[in-house]
Image (cartoon, helix red, strand yellow):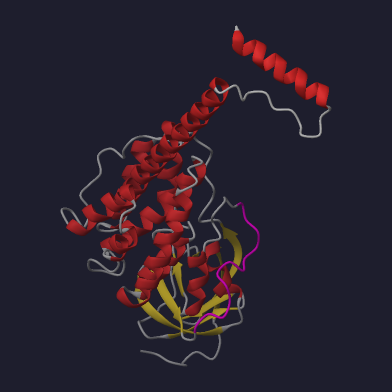
C-alpha cells in the first residue's frame, strides 16, 4: 500500500463521467482510497461522507419520478467512483479515459472532487458528461413484449428468493421484504442478488414511465428505499453505490439498449445478448431483474385497466338508475320557477311515453 507518496499529479488527462457521479466529482476535493484495482477499472471510495445531494447536478432530460428519495440517501455515506477504460463496462458512476489506467493498489491514497480524480500520480479532469438514465420513448403497455426471451440462468437459478421477488412484484404482497431478501445475495463485487435488484429498479421506473403505468414509479420508489437502506450494511461498497444509481434510474448502456428495444426502438435479441455477456453472471442477473420488472409493469397495467373498467361500469350503472328514476333533468336552484316547472312537465311527459 502506498500512502502520501505523490506530491502532485505527474500525468494529466481528461475523461468523460456519468451524471451519477456529478455530485461527488463537483464537490470540494476530498480524500479517497482505492477499493479495488483491475486492468480496466479502478474503484475509489471517499474517506469522509459526501456532503452534497446526488441530485445536485446540471439539468438533464428527465422523466417523471426520477427524483426519487433513495437518490438523496446516497449522500449520507462515502461515495464510490470508478475510473475505467473502454474495455470495462460503462458504469453510471464511472469516469472513462482513453488508454491505460494509472497504476494503483488497494488501499492507495486518492483524491476525488473539484471536477477531477487523482490516483497513482495521475489527475483525470472531467471534461464532459453523459446521461446514464435517458428517458425511453413513449409506448402503450400492450405494445411491450410479454417476456424477455431466452434468458440465461444467471447466478441465482432456482433460488427461492428470486421466485419470491418475482411473485411479490406481481401481487404487491410483502414486496419490500422480498427485495431485501436479495440484497448482498451471492459472491463478488456485485452479488447476483444486487444485480437482479438493479435491473428491476431501473425497469420499473423506465418502462413504467414510458408506458404511462402510474403505479410502477411509486413501486420503484418503495423498493429503492428498502434496498438502498439494506445495502448500506449488507453488501459491498461498490454494489451499494450501483444500487444507489439504479434507485434513480441510472444504469449502463447495455441495459438501456434492452429497455429501448422493449419499446420498439432497436433489436431486442442482439441487445439482450450484449447485456448477458457482461461479467461472469452480472449481465444475466441484470436481465433477470429487467424481466421481473417487465412482468410487474404488465401486471400493474392490467390491474389499472380493470380498476378503470370497474369505475366506468359503476358510473354507467348510476346513470342508468338516475334515468330510470326520472332524475335525468337538473336545473339550477336559482332558475325561474316557470323554467323549473316546464322542465318537470317535460320530464313527466317523457316518462309517460
List x then y, in percent, for residue 62: 59, 52
* Residue 277 is at least partly visible in this image: no
Asked if 29 appears above or below 69 in the picture, the reply is below
Q: Main secondary structure of the magenta part?
A: loop
| Region of the chain picked out in magenta, as a range | 49-61
Query: At 44% from the left edge and 49% from the top edge, which residue is drawn?
Result: 216
Query: At 39% from the left edge and 40% from the top edge, which residue is drawn?
Result: 303
Residue 120 drawn in magenta: no
**Left or right: 162, with 7 as reference point:** left
Residue 262 sits in quarter: top left
Assign the C terminus to one quadrant of the image. Answer: top right
Q: Along the line of sight, which residue is nearer the eye, 349 or 89? A: 349
List x then y, in percent, for residue 109: 45, 87
List x then y, in percent, for residue 329: 67, 23
Asked if 104 appears above or below 189 in the picture, the reply is below
Residue 53 drawn in magenta: yes
Q: Along the line of sight, which residue is nearer the eye, 9 or 157? A: 157
Q: Along the line of sight, which residue is nearer the eye, 180 or 25? A: 180
* Residue 280 is at least partly visible in this image: yes
Query: At 44% from the left edge and 79% from the top edge, which residue is drawn?
Result: 45
Residue 224 sits in quarter: bottom left
**Left or right: 148, with 223 as reference point:** left
Assign the N terminus to one quadrant of the image. Answer: bottom left
Query: At 49% from the left edge and 72% from the top edge, which residue is drawn?
Result: 73
**Left or right: 96, with 342 as reference point:** left
List x then y, in percent, for residue 212: 51, 41
User: What number of labels is visible?
Assistant: 0
Amino acid at each position: 500500500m502506498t500512502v502520501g507518496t505523490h506530491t502532485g499529479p505527474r500525468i494529466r488527462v481528461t475523461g468523460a463521467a456519468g451524471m451519477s457521479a456529478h455530485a461527488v466529482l463537483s464537490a470540494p476535493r476530498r480524500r479517497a482510497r482505492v477499493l479495488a484495482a483491475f486492468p480496466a477499472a479502478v474503484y475509489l471510495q471517499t474517506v469522509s461522507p459526501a456532503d452534497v445531494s446526488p441530485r445536485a447536478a446540471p439539468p438533464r432530460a428527465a422523466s417523471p419520478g426520477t427524483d426519487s428519495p433513495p437518490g438523496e440517501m446516497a449522500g449520507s455515506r462515502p461515495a464510490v467512483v470508478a475510473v475505467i477504460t473502454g474495455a470495462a463496462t460503462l458504469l453510471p458512476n464511472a469516469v472513462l479515459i482513453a488508454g491505460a489506467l494509472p497504476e494503483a493498489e488497494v488501499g492507495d491514497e486518492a483524491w476525488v472532487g473539484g471536477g477531477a480524480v487523482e490516483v497513482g500520480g495521475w489527475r483525470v479532469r472531467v471534461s464532459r458528461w453523459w446521461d446514464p438514465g435517458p428517458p425511453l420513448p413513449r409506448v402503450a403497455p400492450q405494445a411491450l413484449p410479454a417476456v424477455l426471451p431466452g434468458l440465461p440462468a444467471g447466478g441465482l437459478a432456482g433460488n427461492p428468493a428470486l421466485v419470491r421477488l418475482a411473485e411479490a412484484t406481481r401481487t404487491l404482497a410483502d414486496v419490500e421484504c422480498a427485495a431485501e431478501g436479495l440484497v448482498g445475495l451471492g459472491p463478488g463485487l456485485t452479488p447476483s442478488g444486487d444485480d437482479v435488484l438493479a435491473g428491476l429498479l431501473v425497469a420499473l421506473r423506465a418502462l413504467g414511465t414510458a408506458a404511462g403505468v402510474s403505479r410502477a414509479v411509486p413501486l420503484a420508489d418503495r423498493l429503492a428505499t428498502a434496498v438502498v437502506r439494506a445495502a448500506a450494511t449488507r453488501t459491498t461498497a461498490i454494489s451499494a453505490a450501483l444500487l444507489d444509481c439504479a434507485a434513480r434510474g441510472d444504469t449502463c448502456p447495455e441495459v438501456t439498449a434492452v429497455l429501448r428495444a422493449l419499446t420498439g426502438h432497436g433489436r431486442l435479441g442482439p441487445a439482450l445478448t450484449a447485456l448477458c455477456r457482461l461479467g461472469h453472471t452480472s449481465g444475466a442477473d441484470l436481465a433477470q431483474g429487467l424481466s421481473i420488472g417487465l412482468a410487474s409493469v404488465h401486471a400493474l397495467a392490467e390491474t389499472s385497466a380493470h380498476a378503470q373498467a370497474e369505475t366506468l361500469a359503476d358510473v354507467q350503472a348510476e346513470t342508468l338508475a338516475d334515468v330510470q328514476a326520472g332524475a335525468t333533468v337538473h336545473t339550477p336552484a336559482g332558475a325561474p320557477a316557470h323554467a323549473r316547472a316546464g322542465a318537470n312537465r317535460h320530464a313527466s311527459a317523457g316518462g309517460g311515453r
